[in-house]
Image (cartoon, helix red, strand yellow):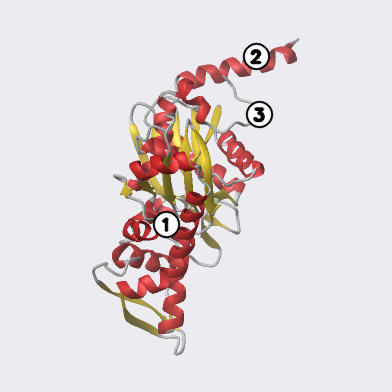
Amino acid sequence: MIDDQQPIICLMFNRFLGKISKDIGIDLGTANTLVYVKDKGIVINEPSVVAVNKNTGQILAIGKKAQRMVGKTPSHIVATRPLVDGVVSDFETTEQMLKYFIDKIHQDSFTFLPRPRVVIGIPSGVTEVEKRAVIDAATNAGAREVYLIDEPMAAAIGARIPVQDAGGNMIVDIGGGTTEIAVLSLGGIVSSRSLRVAGDEMNEDIIKFSRDRFNLLIGERTAESVKIAIGSSHSSDKEFKMKIRGRDLVSGLPKEIQITSSQTREAFSKSIKIIVNAIKTTIEETPPELIGDIMSNGIVLAGGGTLVRGLDKLIVEKTEMPVKKMEDPLTAVVRGAGIVLEDIENLKEILIEMPDMKVLR
């Protein structure tokens, strides 16, 4: 009799904890994780990095603290990203990272065991197994209900695009690990592309260019700082210069060189071409009636990768369509997840359906 009552007691306990927990929206990104708290807005924006002691398995730091350790740790400590190309590559570390963020949100409240309802943005091209990994990681981290939303859909909602209308809208979301391209209409995705080419690939492009052109070995953080400071993708962009330091591959000694915007444009050329060609292919697969709407509304750019100088001009040139850069593109996905969270009953139809998902209400 007691055994039969245990699931009921557990359900009631979770309901009680849910009432005193804060519901959250999460942009679980390859480079950064952003968290939106219902009725408060975005409260966390930290790198998706975890520092682990390999000898003991102990997690030493998460987020900004772990980011500062990248490339500077002894051999027994590894500062790593638990997500690769937008999907979970290290399940246990992802779970610990999510638990850290959930606990951090509730640390100022009296909730001793948080059980929030969670909406998570994921790439549109992930498999069912990869979706399940995100749900399981969030559930094990303490979520009582987990809902998934396609990142391009979340980004569009974050940009205040009327996705449930019968008109066509196109969004290009260039994040750290993936580029999401989608045409949306009537609350669904009509045509889309999900590429494993995005901001991280551009960092790798700069590392390769520096090695091949200058025989200089630089780290990921240096490459990202170059991309942000002087990165360029269009020939009309203003020329900037920047000094970078690394190790000379010939002598093995420290070396400093100067890199220019035109050289970053050369480095990015292959990755940018892949993204632009994917945008053109998505447009080709879009029904003609929706093409007319997109020509009126313009292609909306979201995600940190769209901050690369001249990218909007290049897309206009190659697609012959107007392009709009949204305000604060870095937070588009988490803002969209937050908007869904605020009105989840009316917006459930745009969430990803997982028929075998069990939630505790």
Is residue 313 positioned above or below 151 on the image?
Answer: below
Quadrant, the C terminus: top right
Q: SS at mark 1?
A: helix
Q: Along the polypeptide, which appears first: circle 3 or circle 2?
A: 2
- Asked whether the residues under the numbered discs 2 and 1 touch, taking CB atoms below 8 Å apart as contact, a structural biologist would say no
Which residue is under mark 2?
8
> Which residue is depicted at the point 61% across and 40% down?
131
Which residue is under mark 1?
67
Is residue 206 positioned above or below 213 on the image?
Answer: above
Q: SS at mark 3?
A: loop
> Which residue is depicted at the point 62% across and 37% down?
136
Q: Nearer the viewer, residue 285 or 187?
A: 285
Q: Is residue 50 left or right of residue 210?
A: right
Give coordinates of residue 129: x percent, y percent.
66, 43
Q: CA distance from mark 3 to mark 2?
A: 22 Å
For label 1, the crowd category at 10 Å Cα-Cα, with few meaning under 14, some 14 to 19 and many 20 or more, is: many
Q: Nearer the viewer, residue 166 or 131?
A: 166
